[in-house]
Structures are given as structure tokens and as C-alpha cells.
Image: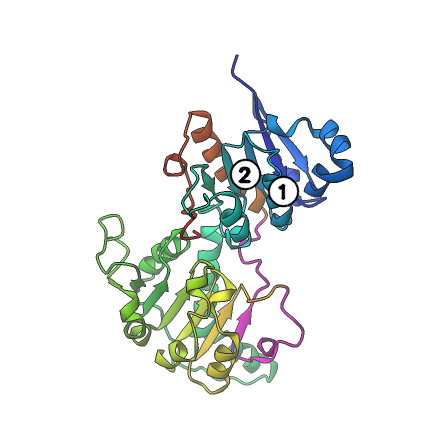
Amino acid sequence: MAERVRVLVLCVDGSPALDALPEIENVELVICTDANRLLGSESADAQNEIGPLDSFTAVLYVPPADPAQLCEVWKSGKLQNIKWVHSFSAGVDKLRNFIAECLLDADGKDNGIPLTNGRGAFSSSLAEFVFCAALHFKKQVPRCQELKRSANWNPFVMQVLRGRTMAFAGFGNIARATAQIAKAFGMRVVALRRSATVSSDDAALLDAAYTSEQKHEMLAAADFVVSSLPGTPETVDFFDAAAFGSMKRSAVFISVGRGTVVDEDALVDALENNAIAGAALDVYKSEPLARTSRLWECDKLLMTHHNADYTEDYFALGWSVWRENLECFLRGASSTDRMATPVDKLKGY
């Protein structure tokens, strides 16, 4: 009989993820909505409810649970048998301190415990949002609506996507899913990467690749700039005044990765000064976005509220990626690179 695997699921009370909780033979998912109870005066009662902490071999973190709680429990030494940690979301920037303090050795090296994420689960919905935004601006939807409101018949010339250049900053799962659609529209696809060499896997999608030193050259050539960059210290304000200044006045900027990569004041300035034609944001530096943010007043800005990927099957998709990694874990994967969606702890994605 296979050994039973116990997984500690850290989530908030009432998390919608629990509505899609899978039932898997020999796998016990134990819900914890307040990891602080595992320490201090309530620890005995809490452990009576969920069992001994050293019986868990895996942890599943479901945002917006507090990762600091997980960090404190981990550092108490009570989770000493954990052999795998998974983040339900694709981004792991909220886990940065946990990774640094609990999943790296004292010398800053990977401690060998695999960390995985929800990468790929939500890529297709974000790709759809990118083209919702692209068509919103190129087909001049706001203009159409204004003409309708004013009962003004004006058959203006329509623009097309075919032959336009879509440039990606970050070419992971989201960008690849989006690039496939771009190719179907007959667009030219380029990307900013660590290397200008296009791999055989990406050759069918990429017409050209640029390095970080060629950032402004790529931006200047793009009709659409799509950011799917991860949130790391190196990517903070990656899109600043200089970046927006390099873009065509007809360019559209679309951000679906992490909000920290955009200097929002610089973006507002670029829109108000007609330095670029439009922008679409699904993510922001601080969420929820403050009512005082200048972004709310931008006429040429399409905004969603970090919900472009929040589809009806959002949690089912997330659990599906977790199960792919679970299968690797049950087969005996003991290192990150043998998991389905491994995270490089040093890079943060």
C-alpha cells in the first residue's frame, strides 16, 4: 500500500480555491487558514486538529494567505520533513522573503527543496486580454462608442493587426501563448531575452530576439509592447520614462506580468503627452489601486483589476498544474528541475 502523503494547504478562510479541492487517493490535503495558531499558546489545539507538523511532506501556498506566517512556522523547525513547496499563483514575488529565509542555505544557495508554481495555468486567458487590448485601440473602440453616443455617422479608416510588430519583454508561458495568437493574425513577433539566439522551440514564434542592451532598439520598432516580466528587484520600473520615450507615438503598451515593472507616473505622463497611443494594465504597483492614483483619470488607458485571468475555471486550472507537479513528486522527484513547473529560487521565477 502506498504511503499517504500529507499536504499542508495555507490559504485564507473561505478561499474559493477550496471549492475545487481535489480528492486524490493516498493524498491528504489539510487546510490551515491561520498558521500563527501552529505556534505559541494555541499550538497544541491546532496540531490536534491537523495532526503533527512533522507528518507533512509538502506545502501548498494559496494567495492571498500571509507568507510571513509560513516563514515563521518553517523557522520554528516543526516542518522539518517538507520535501516540496508549491505556489498556486504563477508569480512568487510575494514569497521572496520566505524563499530567502527558508529555501536557501546560509550562503545563499538553493537548499534542494523543490519550489514550483502555477505557471501556464492562466496563460491563455491573459493572451486573450492582450488581444482584447490590442483590438480595443487599433479598432478605435472608444471612438466608435463616442460616435454612437453623439449619433454621428463617420465611416473612418480602420487599422489592422496584420503586419504589425508585437514586442515582448519576458518570453515565458504568457508571452508564448500570446505570440501564437499574434502569428495567427499575421503579426511580426520579437522579444527581449537574455540571449539574442532564438532556440529551435521558439523559432516558429519569434522573428527576432533582442538582448537587454538592445532594449530601446526593440521598443522603437514595436507597434505593441507586451510586458509579462516577473516581479524581481532587477525588473522594478523596467518601463520608465526613457522606455516610453523610445516607443512610437502610435504604440500601445500592455502589462500583464507584474505591476512593479512599470513606473506608473511615467506611464501617465507618456499618455497625457501623447508619447504613446494607449496602454492597458491588468497589474499595478500596489493593489488594490489607490483611489488617488493618477491612472484612474487617464482617457487612453484600459484597466482591469488583476482579474484578466480570473476565469470561471481559474481554480480548476490552478489545481491541474499542482497535480502535474504532485505526479512528479509521487514518482520520486527530489530536485526542482525534475518538477513540472520549477521555480529558480535565485532568479525568483
Q: Nearer the viewer, residue 345 or 161?
A: 345
Q: Position of residue 328 (x, y in %)?
A: 43, 30
Amino acid type of the residue tagged 2 in the rendering: Trp
Which residue type does callout 1 highlight?
A: Ala
Instruction: Classify mark 2: helix, strand or loop.
Output: helix
Q: Residue at x 60, y 28 (%)?
A: 54
Residue 88 location, quadrant: top right
Mark 2 near mark 1, Cβ–Cβ under 8 Å? yes
Q: Farthest top residue? A: 1
- On the image, the x and y values in percent for residue 18 come to 65, 39
- The residue wearing badge 2 is 319
Point out the tag, 2 or 1, that comes first from the N-terminus.
1
Say the numbered circle drawn on residue 17.
1
Find residue 226 and report its image quarter. bottom left
Horizontal side of residue 162 vs 154, given as left or right: left
Q: Along the horizontal axis of the image, is 197 left or right of 324?
A: left
